Image (cartoon, helix red, strand yellow):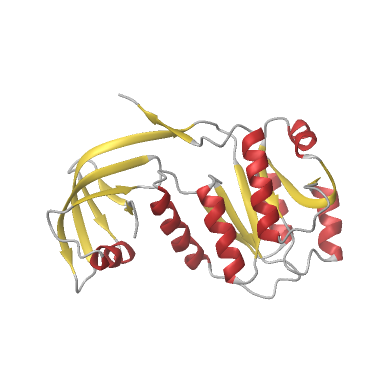
Amino acid sequence: MPNLFYSNLIDLKRMMAEFDEHEVKHMLVLRMKPGDFLRFTDGDGKIFSGVLTEIDRKKLTSKAKIQGIESYRRRQERSLGLCIPHSRWSRMKFAIEKSVELGADLLITCRMDRSNFEVGERKIKLFVRNVIKQCETPFFPKVLNFNNLAELLDWCDENATTLVHLSKDGVSPRKLLDSVNGGNVVLLAGPEGGFSFNELQKLLERSRGMNLGFRTLRFETALLTALIILSYEMNLLWGFEKIEG
């Protein structure tokens, strides 16, 4: 069950919050009732505390009176994200869950030439929401989906972001970061069948390669290993801090 709930329907003038069907179902499982204390986030840097004022089992709606607000900010303006290729949900789920726990602030899914599965964006966003609530994180990562590698490359170009594909022919993480010069980074690993020839050609032309060593890692293991290394090197491990006053 969540340590936090989530609401994007917050009225600070009235100090009230409303919750959607997904959250109300969790409340009902917990047998919550009016008068119960709860904490929730808006996913944009705030954690609220308050008291549940009403819950409707039939309409699956609920409201809470806000009693306290904590504000947080990110420690770094740089962004470190992951691009997870569409694959079996069990493998994607593991990569998404752990990357959110580790503080990735951008999650991209992309259909590759050799992707044999596809997972809907709504399912991914709801899963990310549940992980955030368990981790008590006040920031939701941005979630994007692309239909092919070309779309991903174009987005990176338009958003001043370096796409880094994991390859045994790539450079070390430190050499890679020296060449990025403090910019935003998105990590990409190939799907179960690897990148196609056409994808490799595009990546060689428009992205950077990074080497994690000579072991052959499954894509979810490779992405999480790279995320931990670069989070440390980019000083992103601490993620966010509370704003006092």
Q: Is residue 10 left or right of residue 226?
A: left
Residue at 76% of width from left, 51% of height from top?
165
Q: Image height check: is 28 above or below 37?
A: below
Q: Is residue 242 left or right of residue 54?
A: right
Residue at 48% of width from left, 67% of height from top?
123
Q: Is residue 40 left or right of residue 106?
A: left
Q: In terms of image quadrants, where is residue 26? A: bottom left
Residue at 65% of width from left, 69% of height from top?
87
Q: Residue furthest top?
A: 245
Q: In terms of image quadrants, where is residue 13? A: top left
Q: In terms of image quadrants, where is residue 243? A: top left
Residue 109 rendering spot, x and y as whole percentages: 61, 60
Q: Nearer the viewer, residue 192 or 76?
A: 192
- Placement of the C terminus among the 4 image quadrants: top left
Q: Is residue 225 left or right of residue 30?
A: right
Q: Image height check: is 80 above or below 244?
A: below
Residue 65 rendering spot, x and y as whole percentages: 17, 48
Residue 34 rendering spot, x and y as whole percentages: 13, 58
Q: Residue furthest front?
A: 215
Q: Nearer the viewer, residue 104 or 155?
A: 104
Q: Image height check: is 207 above or below 77?
A: below
- Placement of the N terminus among the 4 image quadrants: bottom left
